[in-house]
Amino acid sequence: MLMSFYDVIQEYDKFALNREIQKADTEDVKRALSKESLLIQDFAVLVSPAASLCLEEMAKKAQHITLQHFGKAVVLYAPIYLANYCVNHCVYCGFNSKNILSRRKLSLDELSREAESLSQRGIKHILLLTGESRKHSPVRYIENCVREAGKYFSSISLEVYPLEEDDYRMLAETGADGLTVYQEIYDRDVYAVMHPAGPKKNYRFRLDTPERGCRGGMRSVGIGALLGLGDWRTEAFYTALHAYYLTKKYPDVEISVSLPRMRPHAGSFPVQCPVNDKEFVQIMLAFRLLLPHIGITISTRERADFRDNLIGLGVTRMSAGSVTEVGGYSNKRGDGQFEVSDERSVEEIRQMLYRKGYQPVFKDWQYI
């Protein structure tokens, strides 16, 4: 078997890593900020308690880097939930198979209505999502949905259960150009607690999914950890390590990072390790400083005012006018995966970006 990120992460002991992060001092932070090009070890310094005292300096450098590589452009996208059937028992998720929900999936006609409703609002980049149930959302169903969505949108990304490389290749040939896979949590011990049953319990298979997508022909691949499940400093480091690894191994693939925080949802799950706004900003700035070229996505999980204040500090992609319910754009809404915090319309997000002097981008890719 070829070397994968699973092999890389085995070299890191979480306790030793945490000690390294905690012992960083202000001089270490200044040295990291003085560098033109950072190493992964510098990221540990930038998420340290010492770096929390240097956020203004980090923000200035992150803003300069973002302008240099991305200009004043922010890509807007929206999710379409195809189905909410799931066979996993993830204790933190609203789609948990044990939760009592109204379960359904879209027919192709219903998807067409969803797509038409959303495209009329200006959205050209979409993310197609399903719960993790191969029985209810087989690969052939996903393929048909990609083909149908291609009639309305120029870029189609997928957030579905982990697939094999050949499946990704087939979906890429059908018209999907992006893949999003959240590891949720990189700490293997905590991962086992959070995923007690179901296919998602297989830590390694999920961890290696982004690479299968890269090899399968996806133009862009996004990763992330769900902030709130484990120690945020070590989780941010492992996410950065993963992104760093992918950019080096697959230079022709656009790698991006999402920063989702826990939100209320069906069921009851107390957030284990809350991440406050200041800590969230520190994580985002550290990512931009380490990886100048990657995309950084901030979804409508975050408050409107908070998202507005992040513009210019590293964000390159934002969801707009989102719903997390199956059929939520064209029909009566039911049970969603989580509560949306920023409920502004696509037009309201567009106008906010204009007021800040930024350009909302609706189309930057066309599948041929």
Image (cartoon, rainbow, N blue to C red):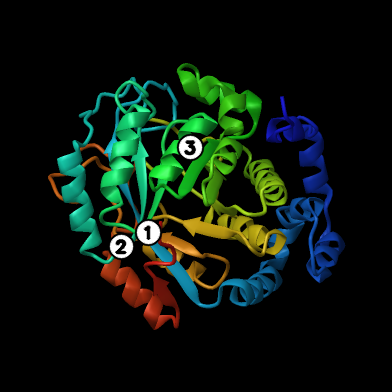
The answer to which of 273 and 175 lies nearer the viewer is 175
Q: Say what amino acid the circle numbered 3 marks.
A: Tyr
Which of the two labelled residues, at mark 2 and mark 3, occupies the earlier sequence position?
Answer: 2
Relative image position of residue 62 (x, y in whole percent): 65, 70
The residue under label 2 is 123
User: Disc 1 vs disc 2: Cβ atoms closer than 8 Å?
Assistant: yes
Which of the two labelled residues, at mark 3 and mark 1, occupies the earlier sequence position?
Answer: 1
Q: Is residue 176 visible?
A: yes
Q: Residues within 10 Å of mark 1 (few under 14, many from 20)?
A: many
Q: Say what amino acid the circle numbered 1 marks.
A: Tyr
Which of the two labelled residues, at mark 1 and mark 2, occupies the earlier sequence position?
Answer: 1
Q: What's the distance in space between the residues labelled 1 and 2, CA to CA? A: 6 Å
Q: Residues within 10 Å of mark 2 (few under 14, many from 20)?
A: many
Which mark, by number, is residue 77? 1
Q: Say what amino acid the circle numbered 2 marks.
A: Ile
Q: What's the distance in space between the residues labelled 2 and 3, CA to CA? A: 24 Å
Q: Is residue 73 left or right of residue 142?
A: right
The residue under label 3 is 168
Q: Is residue 189 left or right of residue 36?
A: left
Look at 70% across and 72% down and name the residue there: 57
Q: What's the distance in space between the residues labelled 3 and 1, CA to CA? A: 21 Å
Q: Secondary structure at mark 2?
A: loop
Relative image position of residue 201 (x, y in whole percent): 53, 21
